[in-house]
Image (tube, rainbow, N blue to C red):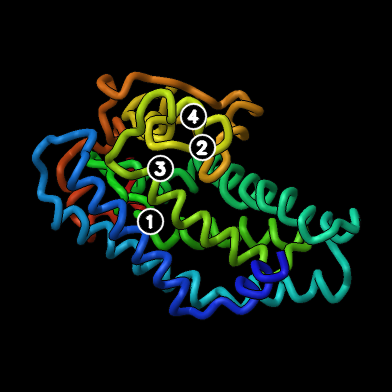
Amino acid sequence: MEAITAYFETIPSSHRTLILVGGLTIFWLLESAVPLFTAEYRRWRHAGINLFFTFTTIVVNFVLAFLLIRGSQWTVANEFGLLHWLNLPTWGVLLLGLPLLDLLGAYLAHWVQHRVPVLWRFHLIHHTDQNVDTTTANRHHPGESVVRFAFTTLAVVLLGAPIWLIFLYQSMSVVLSQFNHANITLPRRVDRVLRYVFVTPDMHRVHHHYVLPYTDSNYSNIFSFWDRLFGTYQELDHQQIRYGVDTHMEEDHHQSIRRMLGIPFERR
């Protein structure tokens, strides 16, 4: 445990970049070798659009990162937050803190964005992708990136999460998001076992089906049990899935960066 905490407490920016790029590369190659859907689409152009939004997400998180770090430092210095009040050992902080960061920073943020109309207008850019693959993972409008960052910061303060736990959580979040958006499928038996704990591609792609109630389901990012616990878990045969969102199925809604940036401000 000491080696893990020491590494993530001082993880170099180059290593965090390697996690992001390495994950994308691995899942991109897997999609090439064993794709679930083989429908023709302009894969490189599609990736270029999604990588633009990946870049804007990185910029937002970089600019605001000092808030996250200062928040964590304050909670540790003042012993504020659930993890401090419970006085847990390091392994307890990991086992409790990691799922709770996922609950507050990812599941709750995701659920709220589907329930609050003004936030949905930003989040739906993620749902306009009609060819979901691993590059879709960070297809977030800059406005949504700010919202997600705010929820993560709130989670850090409420829990009193130390720096090492934050960076471990963010690293897992990046890789698991790339994994559960990937255009691959696992053997049915492996998927059934794995999804009791983690979100799998077959589970998450239901969330990208273009109509309700499936769009409002399977919000989890790392740990799948949050959807089961809060009654938002749904299943749908992948052969019935059509990606997108029913209010924005036109081509320029998912292939034009300029149009996507302006969607939250349109009058509909």
Q: Nearer the viewer, residue 27 or 65?
A: 27
- Give above or below for 48 relative to 254: below
The earlier-in-sequence mark between 1 and 2 is 1
The earlier-in-sequence mark between 1 and 3 is 1
Residue at 23% from the left image edge and 53% from the top image edge? 29
Q: Are marks 1 and 2 in contact (CB under 8 Å)?
A: no
Q: Which residue corresponds to mark 3?
A: 180
Q: Which residue corresponds to mark 4?
A: 217
Q: Nearer the viewer, mark 3 or mark 2?
A: 3
Q: Kindly state the secondary structure of the residue where label 4 is placed.
A: loop
User: Label 1: how many residues lie within 10 Å, few (<14), some (14-19) or many (20+)?
Assistant: many
Residue 69 on image: x %, y %: 66, 75
The earlier-in-sequence mark between 1 and 4 is 1
Q: Are marks 1 and 3 in contact (CB under 8 Å)?
A: no
User: Label 2: how many residues lie within 10 Å, few (<14), some (14-19) or many (20+)?
Assistant: many
Mark 4 residue type? Ser
Mark 3 residue type? Asn
User: Label 4: how many residues lie within 10 Å, few (<14), some (14-19) or many (20+)?
Assistant: many
Q: CA distance from mark 1 to mark 4?
A: 19 Å
Residue 253 shows in the view = no
Q: Which residue corresponds to mark 2?
A: 219
Residue 56 shows in the view = yes
Mark 2 residue type? Tyr
Q: Nearer the viewer, mark 3 or mark 4?
A: 3
- Give above or below for 226 relative to 76: above
Number of the label disc, if any, that sits on residue 245: none
Residue 139 position by quadrant: bottom left
User: Label 3: how many residues lie within 10 Å, few (<14), some (14-19) or many (20+)?
Assistant: many
Number of the label disc, if any, that sits on residue 138: 1
Q: CA distance from mark 1 to mark 3?
A: 12 Å
Residue at 50% from the left image edge and 77% from the top image edge? 63
Residue 256 on image: x %, y %: 18, 55
